[in-house]
Each structure stands twice: as C-alpha cells, then as structure tokens.
Amino acid sequence: MFKKIFFSMLMLAVVSCGNNPKANPNINGSFEGIGNGRNGEVKVSVVVVKGLITAITVLESQETDEYALPVFEKISATIVANNNINIDVVSGATLSSQGILTAVENALKDSGANFKGKKLNVSDTVMSTDVTSSASISTDTVTSASIVPKELITTYQVKGFVDSAKKKVLFVHGDPRHYSVQTDMLNTSMKFFEDNGFEVELRDLYQMKWSPILSVEEFYYQKDGKGTPPSEIVKEQKLVTQADYIVFSYPNWHDTPNAIVKGYMERVFASGFGYTSTPKGPKGLLDGRAIFTIMNAGFLGGGRGDVGDGLINKEAWDSYMNAFRVLDNDSAKWWGMSNLGRFVNDRTPKNNSETYAEELQELRVSLTNHLDTVFLK
Ligand SMILES: Cc1cc2nc3c(=O)[nH]c(=O)nc-3n(C[C@H](O)[C@H](O)[C@H](O)COP(=O)(O)O)c2cc1C
C-alpha cells in the first residue's frame, strides 16, 4: 500500500558558505520531483523564492518513518540552510538519502537555476538564525513564519484620532514584520473600523522602536504612581484616554502578549492612570472602555475566532480560548475596562499554497464578520 508522509521543512536560510551557489533572484516557484529510496519512490515539492530554496515537503514516501524521517529532516534542513543540493548521504541511510536527494535534484531541474555547490556533509553544516547576514535576503524572504505574497499585501494608512464624537479605536500592534498574516489582520481590522464610522489610531510598536523595559525609576511610577512619567508614556496615556476600544494585535509567541506589547501594558497602564488603590482594594480607572485582541497563532487546536469557533480539535481550541479569556478579563478588570474577547486564527494559509489568495480572503472575511458581530451588532 502506498504510504503518504506529509512533512514540511520551512526554515531560515544561512546562505553564508562561500562555496554555495549564488541565488538567482529571478527564480521563483514550486517544483515537484521523484527519486528512488530504499522501498520505492520518494516524491517531494520544493519551493524557491527569489532563487532561495525555502521549503522542502516530502509528499509521498514508502520508506520506514522511524528511520527515514530524521534523514529527510536533516537533509532538507541542510539544503535549505545552504541553498545547495550537493549533499552527502547520511551514513547508515544511503538509500533513503539518495531517494530524497534525487527527488529534490529532479524537482529543481525544471527551475533553470544551479543549486549545486561544493559537496556538503549534513553534520558539517550549522543552522543559524542570522538570516540578515546575507546581504541578498531580508528576514522576510526566507522564514518559517507566514509570508503574505507580494501581490496580496495590503497597506492601510489610518486617519488617526481627530476631535470628533466618533467612537475611537486604538490599535497597539506588536509585529516586526509588515508582510505577516498578523499585519494583514491588523490592516483588515483598521479598515473595517474606519469604513464603519470609527476613528482609528495605530501604535505600531516595532516601527516606533518602543522600549518594553520598565526601568527601576519607572517601576515606582508604575507601581505607586510616584514621580513624573517619561513623555513617551504621557503621549500613550493620552491616546488610551481618548479611546473607546483598545485592540491589541500580536502573533502568539508563547501564549501571552509578546514582549513589546506586554511592555506597553506594563509601562502605560500605570498606577494613578490605569488603576489605583483604595481602602476597599484596587480600582480600575479606565471604565467605559473595552479591550479586544487579534492574534495569529501556530496551532491551538485548529480554529478561527474565539470560544466555540474551533474547527479541528474543538476541545483543545476552547481550552486555549477560555484560558486567554480568563487572563484578558483579569487585565481588563484591573484597568476598569471590559473585555470583548479575541479573534484568534491558526488556520494560516501555507506559504506555498496554490489557493493562497482565496484562503487569505476567507480569513479576511471571517475576521470582518467577527468584528461586525462584536462591535456593530
Ligand atoms: C517566539 C515564538 C513563540 C511561539 N509560540 C507559539 C505558541 O506558543 N503557540 C502557537 O500556536 N504558536 C506559537 N508560535 C508560532 C506563531 O504564533 C506562528 O508562527 C504564527 O503564524 C505567527 O503569526 P505571523 O506568521 O502572522 O507572524 C511562536 C512563534 C514564535 C516566533
């Protein structure tokens, strides 16, 4: 029986070895090829972006998983890291190695580029995250995270808060990449609000070079309201005061707001501004406002939306969403606000999907519908 193995190697390329072939920026595409392994054919798909091999997926194989998968993984990682398909076989697994190597070579025959450099041994190559060390690529070119294809990237310029009676939405966005699905969701949401008569202001924390660090001096201001806050904090507090809704937008990095957004929360929502102490206990000072969170994720059980919107492992999804809800409720309450929940997505289109445009559109529609339900109905 034909056994299928789906596993994907998408990782950061090093491309630093002088003996590796030079990337031809005109070569792009997804190529399929077949090689012969120990037990039969190995079929792969290889994705090339601007002349760099960014992903190798084993589509079909009849090798024994236990032995072959680590071999496929090592070889794929070495190829992607070096952009070089001239890799020595893994000792003890010559035939499986030859299966994937020939499959990749056959796949790339159609690409018209040379990916054969000096022969490399799998164990000789070192993975590195220093993708920026290569002048020819940017961190957004080759990555295991989401990349919205160039032709589908949207940008959105908000009009900001003006002195009107319109409801105001402050976006606090923490994502270093402007081509991510997270930023796509940000743009979709900001447009949704402006289209529906809200005023929108954006704090793009990475672009602002926001410092999440709470210094010792500032700690006492934050904790007890003592001393004068730095001017950048005063500026943010003014925006928070003007806002009716504060929307936090960040990718899921370990299930909490990522450091830069967390640092915004810690520094801006200080004692005397976000909350105060009373003889009866702490009291939030920002009542009448609400928080909402938009988060892209790797995998949280499979779903799109909030509690009840799971699509694959609904139980796992709901347990994550309920956990987020507990924490969001607590933060909101601490500041005297209400929590309107989240839009979480872990159904991100695969970077090499042939139906990427349709899948992205589905995500945008789903997000817009969710915002419609939460904010307009
Ligand atoms: C430091 C780091 C930690 C991560 N932790 C998680 C995690 O705990 N759970 C999860 O589902 N995904 C996690 N991920 C995966 C990201 O959420 C995932 O790549 C997501 O697609 C990011 O959105 P983006 O590609 O639009 O930036 C993590 C990614 C990074 C870089």
Image (cartoon, rainbow, N blue to C red):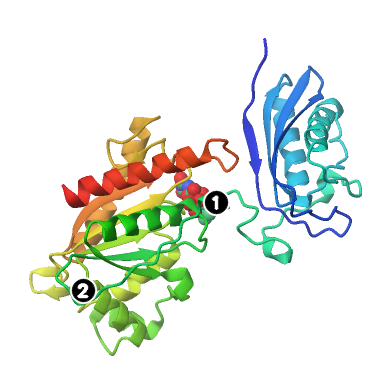
- The kind of residue on which mark 2 rests is Gln
Determine the residue positioned at 46% across, 54% down.
253
Q: Which-is-in-front pick, marks 2 and 1? A: 1
**Number of numbered discs on residues:** 2
Q: Residue at x 77, y 45 (%)?
A: 78
Residue at numbered disc 1 = 151
Q: Give the camera-side residue of 322 and 376.
A: 376
Please report the residue visible at 41 percent of the width from the left and 35 percent of the height from the top: 302
Q: Quadrant of residue 109?
A: top right
Looking at the image, which is closer to me, 87 or 111? 111
Residue at position x 43%, y 67% in the image: 260
Q: Is mark 1 within 8 Å of ligand 1?
A: no
Horizontal and vertical percent position of residue 298: 48, 44
Q: Position of residue 269 (x, y in %)?
A: 27, 72
- Residue 203 visible from this viewpoint: yes
The reply, left or right, for residue 252 in relation to residue 177 is left
Q: Is residue 287 above or below residue 192?
A: below
Could you tell whether 235 is left or right of 103 in the image? left
Q: Which residue is mark 2?
A: 242
Residue in front for this viewpoint, 116 or 317: 116
Q: Which mark is residue 292?
A: none
Image coordinates of residue 189 in percent, x first then y, are 33, 55
Q: Nearer the viewer, residue 135 or 250?
A: 135
Whether residue 61 sits left or right of residue 336 in the image: it is right
Q: Residue furthest left?
A: 280
Secondary structure, mark 1, is helix
Name the secondary structure under disc 2. Answer: helix
Whether residues under marks 2 and 1 lie with C-beta atoms below 8 angstroms apart, the answer is no
